Structures are given as C-alpha cells and as structure tokens.
Image (cartoon, rainbow, N blue to C red):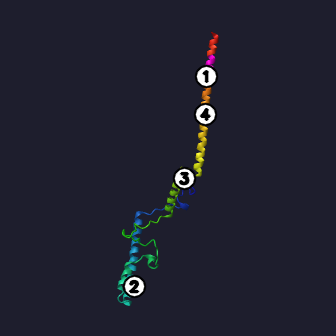
Amino acid sequence: MPKGGKKGGHKGRMRTYTSPEEIDAQMKAEKDRKKNEEEEEEGAAVNDNQKDDKFAGSGSEDSDDESSQRRKGVEGLIEIENPNRAAQKTKKVTDIELEGPKQLSRREREEIEKQKAKERYMKMHLAGKTDQAKADLARLAIIRKQREEAAKKKEEERKAKEAAQAAVAAAKGLHTLSLK
C-alpha cells in the first residue's frame, strides 16, 4: 500500500476540482481586469501627450509614435537589447555572393583532409610502399613457399603409395605363380 494510504492525496488532503462555471467566471474577471488596466494606461498616455504638446509646440508626431508602440508591463520602463528578439533581415538574391570563394567549416575541412589522406595511403599501399603492404607481401611469400612444399610432399607421398601398390601387386603375382 502506498505511503499515503487511502487518504487519496498529498499530505492527507482530498483533491478538489473546479467546475467549468467557476473557470468561465475567472476568465471573464481576468479579461475585465486587463481591459481596465489598458484603459487606464491609455488615459495616462493621452494626459502625457497633452502635457508634451504644451511644452514642445510641434512635436506631436514623435509622441504619436511612442503611444502606438506602447509596451506592456515593465517593458515600457526598461530598455532591453536582446539580439535574438530583433527581426531577421532578409537577404536579396542579388546580394548573395555566389562566385566568391566558399569558406569551409572546420569539420568540412577536416573531412576533406581525411579523405585525401586515405586516398594517398591506398595508392602507396597498392604500390607496396607502406609497412603494412611490405608485411603482407612477406607473409604471402611465406604462404606460397609452404604451399609449394606441401604440394611436393603430397606428390612424393602419392608416388610412394603407387610404388607400394605396384610392389604389392607384383608380390601377389609371384605368390600366385609359386602355388601352381
């Protein structure tokens, strides 16, 4: 049985569920609250604009731009330079340099160098200039010698066996002659 027993929840409390009506009421209250805050901010912005117009005769264009770019919450108070937030500038096809030398990344350069080194090694290996190729050729020469010796030995054994069979056949022939 689990640690909590039959109590059904964390630290012995029963779970409580909110009804859909309560959720709708909370959502409506939050919307009303946000709407009231926005109206208050607009009223304050209009009052600020009127004060600025009194002090700066023809500067109404600047104040209109500021009110249209109104920021919510603390963003209006703090200026933040976030390079990730800036909109990405699109490059035109004509601006892209196609004929210039392409800069390879470090991984691409290393991959190309690795392939070239492997090709050089294979050429030298086929020519028999590498240590491994020399060792392989020496081992092949030893194996060829062993096979030649084994073939000679086998041939000699076959000839000896044939000679023995001929001697046995001749002995049988003499044996049959002596009985007559």
Residue type, mark 1 in image: Gln
Q: Which residues are magenta?
A: 163-172
Residue nearest the viewer, comparing 93 with 57: 93
Specify the label residue 152 is tagged with. Answer: 4
Residue type, mark 2 in image: Asp
Which structural element holds mark 1?
helix
**Depicted 121 relative to depicted 34: above or below:** above
N-term mark: 2 or 1:
2
Task: Give the residue drawn at x 37%, y 78%.
Answer: 68
In terms of image quadrants, where is residue 138? top right
Specify the label residue 165 is tagged with. Answer: 1
In terms of image quadrants, where is residue 19? bottom left
Residue type, mark 3 in image: Met
In terms of image quadrants, where is residue 28? bottom left
The image quadrant where one finds the C terminus is: top right
Q: Residues within 10 Å of mark 1 (few under 14, many from 20)?
A: few
N-term mark: 4 or 1:
4
Q: CA distance from mark 3 to mark 2?
A: 83 Å
**Depicted 58 relative to depicted 73: above or below:** below
In the image, taking residue 151 as reference, residue 46 lies left or right, namely: left
Residue nearest the viewer, comparing 168 with 118: 168
Please tell me whether residue 108 belongs to the stretch shown in magenta.
no
- The tally of labels here is 4
Task: Give the residue drawn at x 37%, y 85%.
Answer: 49
Residue nearest the viewer, comparing 83 with 134: 134
Task: Give the residue drawn at x 59%, y 31%.
Answer: 155
